[in-house]
Image (spheres, helix red, strand yellow):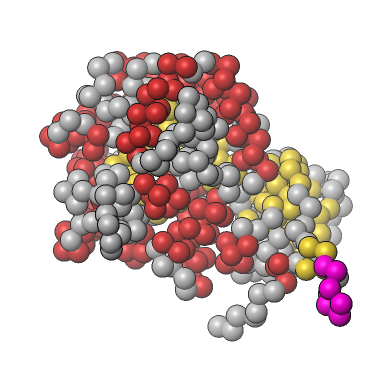
Amino acid sequence: MTLDLLIRGATLPDGRTSQDIAMRDGRIVAVERAITAEAAEVIEAGGQLVSAPFIDPHFHMDATLSLGIPRINRSGTLLEGIALWGELKPLLTHEALVERAMRYCDLAVAQGLLAIRSHIDISDSLIAVDALLDVRERVKPYIDLQLVAFPQDGYYRAPRAVALLNEALDRGIEIVGGIPHFERTMEAGRQSVEALFRIAADRGLRVDIHCDESDDPLSRHVETMAAETVRYGLGDRVTASHTTSMHSMDNYYASKLIALIAESGMNVIANPLINITLQGRHDTYPKRRGMTRVPELLAAGVNVSLGQDCALDPWYSLGSGDMLEVAHMAVHVAQMTSQDAMATCFEAVTTHSGKTMGLEGYGIAPGCKADMVLLQAANPVEAIRLRATRLAVIRAGRVIARTPPREAVLSLPGRPAHVNPASYAPRICS
């Protein structure tokens, strides 16, 4: 039988080289050397990296591409971003929300980003819920879009959030969200975590909570999350996002907390681009880095993913849908510059995030979905270093995006006529 697509001579993230990848009927049917079957299309990888697609496990699609509406966040702070979002919400329309989200999804596909988990603010309206449920159906053929009911103004603090969260779940939102550190008191935050876990357990849903996104070392709601995860036996169906207060905690308490998180089996998502920008704003010098303790969590066996969080919205005036940019920032902020640590950061925007989202059939192996990206890089570390060009993005065994290789043309006497950035890395000896 003829294959739908055959990639020849690929390097895989685990280091295997000269691998052919055969695809038929939306699935990978073989990964091995020298596959001889005929195919409707053949791509010569030439030793370049083929990875499962990129994943963004933490994003806010309801706000994306809204930069400048109704004004710019001039201070760049989290609190002004929240205030600005409050000014923008009354201006939202179903049509505008869908249009911006669809444009962002176009960008995501071009970047090889084929799975996204988006939080939707349900504090005082479900207009964004209905819009993103519409978007989820529209992009279903090419993006796995998970949606979180997120009471951004506080589950108890926002007067209508309790009722609207339940209504959002009734309409088809599949993940329970929260923001305990934004409640009026620590006790109200703790109570919100307990209430949200009870809802998730009763409904059989996943949990993903913005937790301790603060410079306050006494913001410790992730401790309650770990306890509730164990209480309900939810394990890796639970995710704590941000947890930036850990960068300010004393080492003794942090060591206790990391052990509790590991014991619970929950996931953690760090968002290096936004947290290095928003945290530490009240510091003079020295300034805190603003990201949670990624290396220590990984060392304890916690599944850590990296999210983009924002792109061109009230909180972040940058962002490009590029998860390699996210990994690149994490490498620097967390000082994860060994070869193994950098490779782990690549995993944090691919396989680790696939586990966080519970994606079925994710990976480059027989039986997995035929979703992948061909990169202009020889390995994961080089992909991060160069934020490598996505030469081909494949969904269900079909190429859905192509980008020409990055190459500069030089006019210098006695020098090469062409420069390919990927050809300049020295050979690393193990």
Place of residue 278 in the rendered image (x, y in percent of width and height, measured from the top left): 36, 46
The answer to whether 378 appears left or right of 343 in the picture is right
Q: Is the residue 119 above or below the residue 338 in the image?
A: above
Q: What percent of the width, then of the height, locates residue 228?
A: 22, 40
Residue 246 in the image: state x and y as whole percent: 26, 54
Q: Name the foreground residue: 149 vs 251.
A: 251
Q: Quadrant of the C terminus?
A: bottom right
Is residue 57 shown above or below 373?
Answer: above
Residue shown at 52% from the left, 65% from the top: 343
Q: Is residue 238 left or right of residue 68?
A: left
* Principal secondary structure, stretch drawn in magenta: loop
For the question of whether residue 367 can be seen, the reply is no
Is residue 405 left or right of 155 when viewed as pictured? Answer: right
Q: Residue visible at 34% across and 17% down?
A: 124
Point 47% across, 71% down: residue? 337
Image quarter of residue 198: top left
Magenta span contains residue 412: yes
x and y percentages locating residue 43 in the rendered image = 81, 55
Give the extent of the magenta segment.
410-416
Please say if 219 is above or below 123.
below
